Amino acid sequence: MSLKKHSDHKYIEALLQNDNRVLNELYQKFSGKIILYVTKNSGSYDDAQDVIQEVLITIFHQANERNFTLTCPFDAYFFLLCKRNWLNKLNKKGIKKVTILEEITSITDEQEFLVQETEMYEKRTALFEKKLIELGGKCKELLDVSFKLKNMEKVAAFLNISYGYARKKKSECMSKLTKMIKSSSNFNSLTTM
Amino acid sequence: MNEKDAQFIEQFLNNELNETEVKTFNFRLKNDVDFAKEFNLYKEVNDTLSKRFSDKDRENELKETLTILGEKYVKPNKNNSDAKPKIFFLQRYNKFLVAASLVIFATLLWFNDSKPNFSDYANYPNLELTTRSTTANNHIKKAENSFNNKDYEAAQKELEILLKTDRTKVELQLYLAICLMEQNHFNKADKLLKKISNGNSVYKDKAIWYLALSKLKQERYKKCKEYLKKIPKDSSEYADAQDLLSRL
């Protein structure tokens, strides 16, 4: 597997930098195929807009949190992610009938791998966020603040508790959170790639 | 993971262990497979959520840009002839957005945590549809049950079916928008709510209130405030709106 950065990595950089010029180019070049796919398969223009935005935010998360490097052309990678996102939504709605537009889907193994990696990342981190919400109460409040402020002295000052107590509570709450994540039925299928 | 190990990991990540303790830590990491697994997951969750939470403002700025680009490129009947001047406009507009967001970001950096939560205000009246028709009866029941049990995905499905036969029923549209908002489908939810808020139905003020809640959930506090200020004094949402405004 080549790890060489593809020239289309500029679109990933544009998401990280919120670069309006390059993002304009991204929409201009790549949104057409996705709109066509979604609207040919029981979706509306609003659905297409949501799919595109959700996928781009997922890529942003992966790039921002894991230094994701694009090693293949953006076109097929992006299309396949959007396509699968939409198929999942259709599946949830119970719609199985899908019009296949083969002429716009030519996927290499490398692209397939990157798509799976991005999808896995999205599902795994969504599980983290879901379990944090389920954790609730004081634990969630303390973790929310410690994730935002990072520095435990600031966390303690913000919550008006002692530094020692804040640190002890954070590890206790993290222990609870990781237990909940691990005991989730789909955790074992969400391996890091 | 037991809490003692969690504390040990937390101290290690914060560089609070002395030399001997670091050696013990590294020894366990190398020789205790279960401990190593616990450490990796702890660190992954901590690193991922820290980054995601601290970069929420950047994410929201990007969403603003993507929403504008989506309106421009994804909606039908947009042609290239009207795109060019808009590129110029949007680039300038985006600069303004970035500048404005930077100011907001700097202001919010320390005070963001004191903002009210969406869940504090997301209390909806039960869905009780009074209209009855023989064909839609089953879907009405399902929509009511799903919504009142907070199964918004199922309620959305049923409401969409009901709206196929009764597209003009604003109450259904309002509850559909709530379902969409609850599932974070903000583009669709906001569009529907704007449509209701621009109409003259009895749900007009409720739609403005839910638009404000949608913005609150998206952590777009400025927009949230703008909507809250639009709710008139004689509206049943006025008290809640004032309460939320005072906390923003």
Image: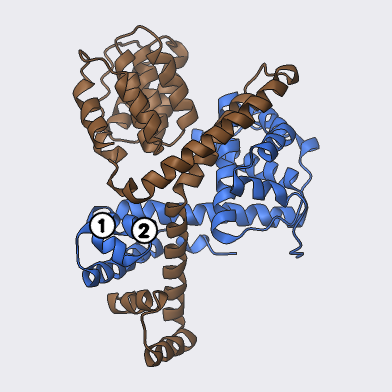
Chain colours: A blue, B brown
Q: Residue at x 37, y 18 (%)?
A: B172
Asked if marks 2 and 1 touch (Cβ < 8 Å), the reply is yes
Q: How far apart are the two marked residues, 2 and 1, measured between alpha carbons?
A: 9 Å
Determine whether, in the image, residue A141 is placed left or right of residue A104.
left
Residue B152 percent coordinates (x, y)? 37, 33
How many residues crowd mark 1 within 10 Å: few (<14), some (14–19), many (20+)? some
Residue at 62%, 28% (x, y): give it: B90
Q: Quadrant of the C terminus of chain B?
A: top left
Q: Which residue is located at x 44 percent, y 15 percent? A: B195
As drawn, A123 above or below A179: above
Residues packed near mark 2 inside 10 Å, few (<14), some (14 to 19) or many (20 plus)? some
* Dot placed on the residue nearer the N-terminal end, 2 or 1: 2
Q: In this image, B238 relative to A28: left or right?
A: left
Q: Nearer the viewer, residue A188 or A155?
A: A155
Q: Which residue is mark 2?
A: A149
Residue B138 visible here: no
- The answer to whether any part of residue A155 appears in the image is yes
Chain for disc number 1: A
- The secondary element bearing badge 1 is classed as helix
User: In which quadrant is the N terminus of chain B drawn?
Assistant: bottom left
Q: Which residue is mark 1?
A: A158
Q: Amino acid at mark 1?
A: Phe
Instruction: Say which of B2 and B207 sits in front.
Output: B207
> Do marks 2 and 1 both belong to one polypeptide chain?
yes
Considering every residue shown, the one lying at the far top of the view is: B200
Up the image or down, B101 lies above or below B198; here it is below
